[in-house]
């Protein structure tokens, strides 16, 4: 089902760099967008989709939301787990709504509160290829399992995937759950509140726990491989 089209594309070369509008981007399966700072095989935040309606409602200047793909779609209505076909080759897995951040406050005081779920939707690249403005966007079946907008629930999702008799470092847990490394300070209390079965599954990087450390390499790949195979068939 067609839901819209790409209105504009942008990349950021570094965290300090502003978004730069481009006329084409290359999506790399399992990695993200070629040349973008957020391309990362272990991140659920490989790219950001924002809607033109958010720009219109809040009278925002171009690139204010720092999106990679600007769509003529209300991204707040998109559901986690949805697979989007973009153009001929690219397939994206929608992960979770992007949280409002301090950058929005710098744009306009109070914006991070008012914008709510219209900040944009984060996604991973399932099938690579080239994208251009004007490319159609459609939702395809079947969807993949949803990820929560609540970072605490995502922490539990990642810990649930950690193999038995293994641990994960706080730093890698933050990466896989799609939260800033500053959240690591909150992990001990957050994990304790999840319940006893999560106790000891995550450790500081400098921990001397002798158990193998899970690197998270296989967290996303089973679903990614299934969809990539379907797209190629």
Image (cartoon, grey):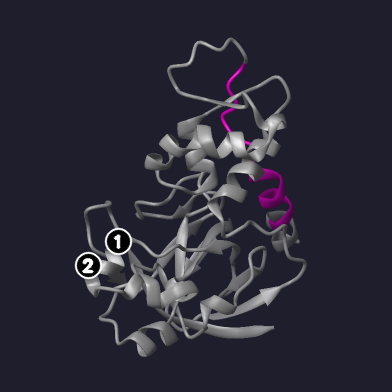
Q: Quadrant of the C terminus?
A: bottom right
Numbered range of the magenta stretch: 212-227
**Is residue 103 among what the camera can see?**
yes
Residue 130: image location, x then y, percent: 48, 66
Can you say whether 31 is above or below 104 in the image?
above
Question: Which label sits on residue 82?
Answer: none
The residue singled out by tag 2 in the image is 106
Cβ atoms at labels 1 and 2 below 8 Å apart: yes
Q: Secondary structure at mark 1?
A: helix
Q: Quadrant of residue 138?
A: bottom right
Give the total number of marks visible in the rendering: 2
Is residue 214 within the magenta segment? yes
Q: Answer with left or right where residue 143 lies relative to residue 17.
A: right
Q: Quadrant of the N terminus?
A: bottom right
Can you say whether 186 is above or below 28 in the image?
above
In terms of depth relative to the viewer, which is nearer, 103 or 142?
103
The residue singled out by tag 1 in the image is 102
Q: Quadrant of residue 211?
A: top right
Is residue 120 within the magenta segment? no
Mark 2 is surrounded, within 10 Å at the Cα level, by few (under 14), some (14 to 19) or many (20 or more) other residues, namely few
Q: Answer with left or right where residue 139 lies relative to residue 124.
A: right
In terms of depth relative to the viewer, which is nearer, 214 or 111?
111
Alpha-carbon span between mark 1 and mark 2: 7 Å
**Is residue 20 among what the camera can see?**
no
Q: Answer with left or right where residue 33 lies relative to residue 195.
A: left
Give me the residue at 62% from left, 50% from top: 153
Residue 100: image location, x then y, percent: 40, 65
Residue 132: image location, x then y, percent: 43, 75
Give me the residue at 56% from left, 75% from top: 87
Can you say whether 221 is above or below 195 in the image?
below
Q: Secondary structure at mark 2?
A: helix
């Amino acid at each position: 089902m067609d839901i819209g089209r790409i209105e504009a594309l942008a990349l950021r070369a570094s965290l300090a760099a502003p978004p730069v509008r481009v006329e084409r981007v290359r999506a790399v399966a399992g990695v993200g967008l070629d040349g973008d700072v957020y391309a990362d095989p272990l991140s659920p935040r490989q790219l950001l989709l924002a809607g033109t309606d958010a720009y219109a409602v809040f009278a925002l200047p171009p690139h204010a939301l720092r999106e990679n793909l600007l769509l003529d779609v209300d991204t707040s209505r998109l559901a986690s787990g949805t697979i989007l076909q973009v153009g001929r080759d690219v397939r994206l897995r929608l992960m979770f709504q992007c949280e409002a951040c301090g950058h929005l406050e710098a744009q306009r005081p109070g914006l991070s509160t008012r914008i709510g779920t219209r900040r944009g939707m984060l996604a991973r690249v399932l099938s690579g290829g080239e994208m251009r403005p004007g490319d159609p966007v459609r939702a395809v079946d079947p969807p993949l399992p949803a990820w929560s907008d609540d970072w605490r629930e995502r922490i539990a999702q990642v810990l649930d995937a950690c193999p038995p008799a293994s641990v994960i470092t706080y730093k890698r847990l933050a990466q896989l759950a799609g939260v800033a490394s500053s959240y690591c300070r909150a992990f001990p209390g957050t994990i304790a509140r999840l319940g006893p079965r999560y106790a000891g599954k995550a450790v500081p990087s400098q921990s001397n726990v002798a158990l193998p450390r899970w690197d998270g390499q296989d967290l996303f790949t089973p679903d990614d491989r299934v969809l990539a195979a379907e797209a190629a068939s």
